[in-house]
Amino acid sequence: MKVRTSPPAKLNLFLEIPAKREDGFHEIDTVMTAIDLCDELSVESIEEPVVELSAHWLPSLETIASELAIDPQSAEAKQLLAIPEDGRNLVVAALQAFRKRFQIESGFRVELGKRIPAGAGMGGASSDAAHAISCAAQIHQLSSDHDGLHEIAASIGSDVPFFLPLPPVSQIASASTNGETTRRPRACHASGRGEILQPVDMRTDLFFVVGYPPASLATKDVYGRLRVPAEPISSKGFLASLRANSLEDLTSLMINRLSEPALEIRPELSELLESLWKSGLQPCQLTGSGSACFGIARDAEFAQTALKQLRANQSVPALWRATRSVAAAATIEIDPS
């Protein structure tokens, strides 16, 4: 059996770091939304007890490198655009964990087409891993509600559970909607290490333009420079404005505590942010630990207008993409091939 899906990226609309935990990780207070910049993933069962992964860029490595204004054969491209196909890839790690957790003797063959860059703070690897888990569950006829799936996801990475269907509404605190919309929300508030999720009732789509520069950032490096605030800002005000669809208020309420250390490591990100602001998008900020930045557009038409303007500005090479909010857990389909 072979199944396929389109794992989406995510953006952190709000990200505060209230404290450092005793286990060495950090407490987070974040609001994330999934966007329609998606990878392509297919998973099929094979008899051999292994996980085979083949990966490539969409539409091609050469096209992506050209947009970033780098030589596709250069050492820079190999470092920035390399896609591991072994256990370093979270898809392989997730499927191996799935086999172990459910005592699966057979293996998986995986094909991964990448559109979401790595080291961007957009959760591409986490989304791929979560959707690989969901694909494996469908192949082996496990319910998407199975506790074991969320256990595997949380063990792989803090962002991974966001991309799985949430538990039934009865298990979600203070859920304000019902049914499939709640189980596959476009946005969630995440706390703890990121594994404690609560859906956010977004009444309308949000539209964005995202820019990824020819420079990645390692999460551990950014957190290594983080200064935890003495008086952290709560996400409550931001969540109220988001639920009320008050885009005007979001400008003053959006924050990303990781922006300062990220800019210390990559000062050139300030040019990317400035370009977003000058195009008329607002508010604009870093997502996750970077290096991707984004701005909110008032509608889809304005996002396209800003995208054309940003692409015409050759002084700031980047992967520029116009996107909109979508469900974090993509639909799994049977591949007829």
Image: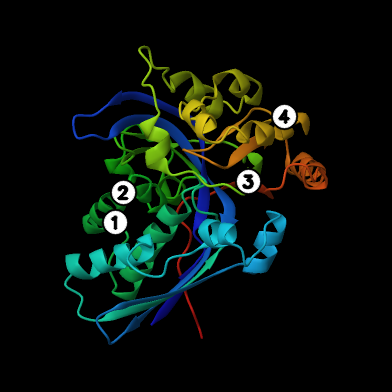
Q: Which is nearer the N-term, disc 2 or disc 4?
A: 2
Q: Which is nearer the N-term, disc 1 or disc 3?
A: 1
Label 2 sits on residue: 167
Label 1 sits on residue: 145
Q: Quadrant of residue 267?
A: top right
Label 3 sits on residue: 213
Cα distance in 3D space between marks 1 and 3 = 37 Å
Task: Point out the frontmost of discs 4 and 1.
Answer: 4
Local SS, label 2: loop
- 46 to 172, vertically: above or below: below
Local SS, label 4: helix
How packed mark 2 is, by other alpha carbons closer than 10 Å (few <14, some 14-19, many 20 or more), is some
- Quarter of the figure that contains the N terminus: bottom left
Q: Which is nearer the N-term, disc 1 or disc 2?
A: 1
Cα distance in 3D space between marks 4 and 1 = 41 Å
> Is residue 98 rendered to the left or right of residue 205?
left
Residue closer to the observer: 38 or 239: 38
Task: Point out the frontmost of discs 1 and 3.
Answer: 3
Q: Which is nearer the N-term, disc 4 or disc 3?
A: 3
Label 4 sits on residue: 277
What residue appears at the point 39 percent right and 27 percent down from the top-left corner?
A: 226
What residue appears at the point 62 percent right and 41 percent down from the top-left corner?
A: 205
What residue appears at the point 19 percent right and 29 percent down from the top-left corner?
A: 22
